[in-house]
Amino acid sequence: MKLRLAGMPLAPTDLPSLVAFWDFQDDNLLSIGPAPIRLTVGGAPLEFVDEGVFGTRALRFRADGIRAANHLFATAADAPALNIGGSDAQVTVVAWIKREPTAYQGCQFIAGVWNEHHRRQYGLFLNLAIWDSAEQVGAHISSHGGPTPGHPYCMDVAIGATPVPVGPWQCVAISYDGEFARAWLDGRLDVREPQGDYGRNPFRYPGGLLKGDADFTVGAVARPAKVESDGRGGFIESGGLIANPFTGLLGGLAVYRRALTGTEIAGLAAIGR
């Protein structure tokens, strides 16, 4: 499927610095791009539905309580191109999603390098519920790979202002240009005014991204089951689960090794409209 940008026909694969693009039109889950990356199925088997953005199919993801019923992943060893780190690192993650109703009320993970048992880098979330937010797009980033100092979790994030609706197809995206993280909803920067030092969009975060060793996951994230204070200003992690489940359809997913422009993201959001 084509879109038009600045008067020229364009597909997601035509934009410079593409790492991987999945259109989910067949079962092999192999990306289109300079270094094809195959996603592995975790949990329940793949569930395709007969609607989509880049064709007639999309993947359905479901929650099982607080756990993910199904998810996808590529190990760090199998997908080094997705390990986007360094002081000058930039990244954009774009996803075409259709949220569905769910009893699960926690945060939902779309895609990124954010396995919390390892050194995380970037992640596209919904409904983070931190910094007085709920249901918006969240752009988590990390230059150190772990929780924000003084907190049990990473709190470094750009969070939009607009709840992502349940029902219609949406294009959601995050970007990081080495100075600012940004959260995008349907092709526009979903600006949120500053609230203290955190929780705004754009969110200033100079210093780049960690060159980490975490897996790339889609539809859920691996994380500790419990994080508790150690009584000395630190925190203790225990257990593990595949959680933060996304509930809905995923019609396409693209990762770029640079911060796309607003015009480019607006063009991608126009696909299927």
Image (cartoon, rainbow, N blue to C red):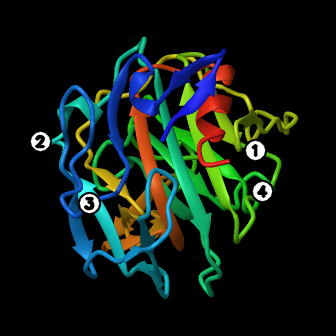
Three-letter code, disc 1: Gly
Q: Which residue is mark 2?
A: 77
Callout 3 crowding tier (Cα within 10 Å): few <14, some 14–19, many ≥20: few
14 or 73: which is nearer to us? 14
Q: CA distance from mark 1 to mark 2?
A: 33 Å
Between marks 3 and 2 in the image, the one whose residue lies nearer the viewer? 3
Residue 115 is labelled as: none
Q: Locate residue 205 relative to residue 211 in the image: left or right.
A: right
- Which of disc 2 and disc 1 is earlier in sequence? 2
Secondary element type, mark 1: loop
What's the mark number on residue 160? 1
Residue under label 4, please give it: 133
Inspect the image, locate mark 2, and give the three-letter code of the amino acid beneath it: Ala
- Alpha carbons under labels 4 and 2: distance apart: 35 Å
**Label 4 – label 1 distance at C-alpha:** 8 Å
Q: How far, Cα to Cα, is label 3 from label 2?
A: 24 Å
Nearest to N terminus: mark 4 or mark 1: 4
Quadrant of residue 146 in the image?
top left
User: Closest to the observer: 8 or 27?
Assistant: 8
Q: Is residue 221 visible?
A: yes
Give coordinates of residue 125: x percent, y percent: 56, 53
Residue located beneath label 3 in the image: 26
Task: Kindly report the distance in space between the C-alpha atoms of the residues bearing marks 3 and 4.
Answer: 36 Å
Instruction: Look at label 3 and name its amino acid.
Output: Asp
Residue furthest out toward the left: 77
The residue under the point 51% across, 25% down is 10
The mark nearer the N terminus, 3 or 1, is: 3
91 versus 62 height, above or below = above
* Numbered disc in front, either 3 or 4: 3
